[in-house]
Image: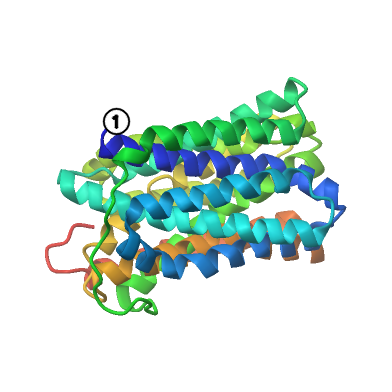
Amino acid sequence: MNEKTATRTIFFVAGLVTATWAVIVPFARFNTSVNEGGLGTLLLCLGFGAMAAMPVTGMLTTRYGCRRVIIAAAIVIMLSMPFLAFVSTPLLLGISLFVFGTGIGVTDCAMNVQAILVEKKAQRPLMSGFHGMYSVGGIAGAGLMTGFLSSGLSILSSTLVLITLVLLLLLLSFRQLLPYANPSEGPAFAVPKGTVLILGLICFIIFMAEGTVLDWSAVYLVDNRNVAESLGGLGFAAFATAMTAGRLTGDYIVARLGALAVVLAGAVAAMAGFVIIICSTPVWLLLTGYLLIGIGCANIVPVMFSQTGRQKSMPQTVAVPAVTTLGYIGVLAGPAIIGYIAHHSTLEHGFIFVIALLFMALVLSYSIRQLLKPGASY
């Protein structure tokens, strides 16, 4: 296994554990007997855990290297996952989600630091492929969990099997994870500004759309569209399948069509997907909507990370953690907002809110070109 394969493996693991949580959500809600608003609050605990961890991840990777930070975060994730599947009180679930979110936040930020370093060393585009492996992990996690549950395994047993798989993958990739990271440059913490702020906002919106699918697709299909509980993970699986196909071909697509065209077309496709799931009831149409969301979101975030290295507003060593933090807040904290909207109105109205944000991302994408370094492609 080389450095590129090890990086792909870590992205796969991140997708695997995130999709596992997506399938656990309805069971966690049943175990704790919370309503949409209560679930939204609990999801906010997950977001707070990530928000607390991400800003310091750049400093941690600089001091200890990507390898140690990624492995430590993965251990936190593995230790917290079983609790998500069986705790029966909202307080314990909130604590478990905070710890789980901390591990997810550190892993997501550290693996992107590793990805940027490996891509720079290879001197060719690799980012879409790395993020594609995250989507592959999402497919595997949703598919395996759905298969285990359909075969009669309990949610706890299914989760423990996935944890065992994660442990094996970490052991295989450990030696090829980078023992270093970017040298310290500028302050350890920085408020996003200029182009970095715009890139981060776009990532926030796209990740919020992804987080809405992650945390609410199973609940929506089971509770609002009467899909069997054991098949609740199919929405996320369809989303992840489309995103995987889009990202694995992303470098080629961006080279042919241009980054801006990919971002604009992606935002339109994602909006169309949400419209379909709001207006449809047949399962095949619902899955088509999730496929469109996946296709639309696939390459927007990788494009934004690539542009982070070309902007002139902030040093790259500060800009990358800033964009990562702001963006991933969307996938972790954003769905809590959807929960509150669903509690006070309907889940469909929460999806309409996401559509409005996607339109904002489309508009913001126009302002990036003139803010980049001269000669930068977009």
In the displayed structure image, the side of residue 94 where residue 135 appears, left or right: left
Q: Residue at x 37, y 78 (%)?
A: 190
User: Relative to 135, does residue 49 appear above or below in the rendering?
Assistant: below
Q: Position of residue 205 (x, y in %)?
A: 50, 61
Q: On the image, numbered disc 1 is attached to which residue? A: 1
Q: Nearer the viewer, residue 23 or 260?
A: 23
Q: Residue visible at 42% across and 44% down?
A: 298
Whether residue 368 appears in this view of the structure is: yes
- Observer able to see residue 202: no
Q: Secondary structure under badge 1? A: loop
Q: Looking at numbered disc 1 in the image, what kind of residue is underneath it?
A: Met
For the N terminus, the image quarter is top left
Q: Quadrant of the C terminus?
A: bottom left
| Residue farthest toward the left in the current orientation of the protein | 375
Is 4 located above or below residue 328 in the figure? Answer: above
- In the shown orientation, is residue 63 left or right of residue 13? left
State the residue at coordinates (56%, 42%). Answer: 17
